[in-house]
Image (cartoon, helix red, strand yellow):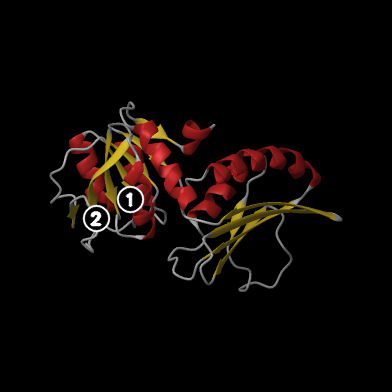
Amino acid sequence: MTRVILRGCNGRMGKMITEQLKVSDILEIVAGVDRFDDKTNTYPVFESFTACNVQADVIIDFSSPQDIEEMFAYAVTSNIGIVLCTTGLSEEQISMIGEISKKIPVLRSANMSLGINLLMQLLQAATKVLERADFDIEIVERHHNQKLDAPSGTALALADAIKEVLTDETSYCYDRSDRREKRRKNEIGISAVRGGTIVGEHEVIFAGRDEVIEFKHTAYSRAVFANGAISAARFLAGKAPGMYSMADVVL
């Protein structure tokens, strides 16, 4: 049985993962880390990793960048891997992840769903063809009105996947309201919509002369992300130090 510490256990995704693992005979949540404890969990919940004294095999992190360095230190000291699902990380924190991955296994993904990770592969294949035909690329992401970061980590991951195979230097454009000019050729537009209870929608638009090709992924339930994180935790437990991705899990 793989033992899991769940950071952010009382958040939306934390509760979803807890629910999914109630019937699992492969993974078990042995502790949670969350500043808020609603006393409904069957496992102990600690306010911080410094207070956590439970042994585990892997950490699943669905929380926020705040105080994430504390988790990094705990994981390295305890020699356990991290499934890192938190988005909105600073450049300094991303650099820290690279350093700790030399000591422990880290699986980082902006989106844990099978569909999104497959979409990245499809976008790269399309980009290689459509770049030669001068197609413009725009990304539109839509999420619920409680989401804090914009654009979403998934939108940036999709843009990064596209940029990786482009032959020309490309920049990201998040807002055109401050300039009055034609669209620049070598840019990827990224727009964020926030409203209602939208779980997550990502649309990638390739716009050419007289034709448009669109790729779209819609998540109807957070369960797709929870199940992806659970699969990632099963994969990562016991792995050698290094940086892993969902492509290692699902492809």
The reply to whether residue 95 is visible in this rendering is: no
Give 10 or 89, whichever is nearer the viewer.
10
Residue named by callout 2? 41
Badge 1: few (under 14), some or many (20 or more) residues near its Cα, within 10 Å?
A: many
Q: Earlier in the sequence, mark 2 or mark 1?
A: 1
Instruction: Kindly give the residue lying farthest to the front in the view shown.
Output: 23
- Callout 2: few (<14), some (14-19), or many (20+) C-alpha neighbours within 10 Å? some
Q: In what element is the residue under mark 1?
A: helix
Left or right: where does residue 94 sit relative to residue 200?
left
Q: Residue at x 59, y 40 (%)?
A: 118
Quarter of the image where the N terminus is located: top left
Amino acid under disc 1: Thr
Q: Position of residue 213 (x, y in %)?
A: 76, 51
245 or 179, nearer to the observer: 245
Residue drawn at x 54%, y 42% is: 114
Location of the C terminus by quadrant is top right
The answer to whether residue 9 is left or right of residue 160 is left
The answer to whether the residue labelled 2 contacts the one labelled 1, judged by CB atoms less than 8 Å apart, is: yes
Location of residue 89 in the rendering, given as x and y in whole percent from the top left corner: 38, 54
Residue 34 shows up from this direction: yes
Q: Which mark is residue 18?
A: 1
Amino acid type for the residue under numbered disc 2:
Asn
Residue at figure coordinates x 35%, y 43% from the top left? 23
Q: Quadrant of residue 244?
A: top left
Disc 2 to disc 1, C-alpha distance? 8 Å
Judge left or right: residue 27 versus residue 44: right
Look at the picture and state if 241 lies above or below 46.
above
Residue 104, given in percent of the width and then of the height, sits at: 29, 33
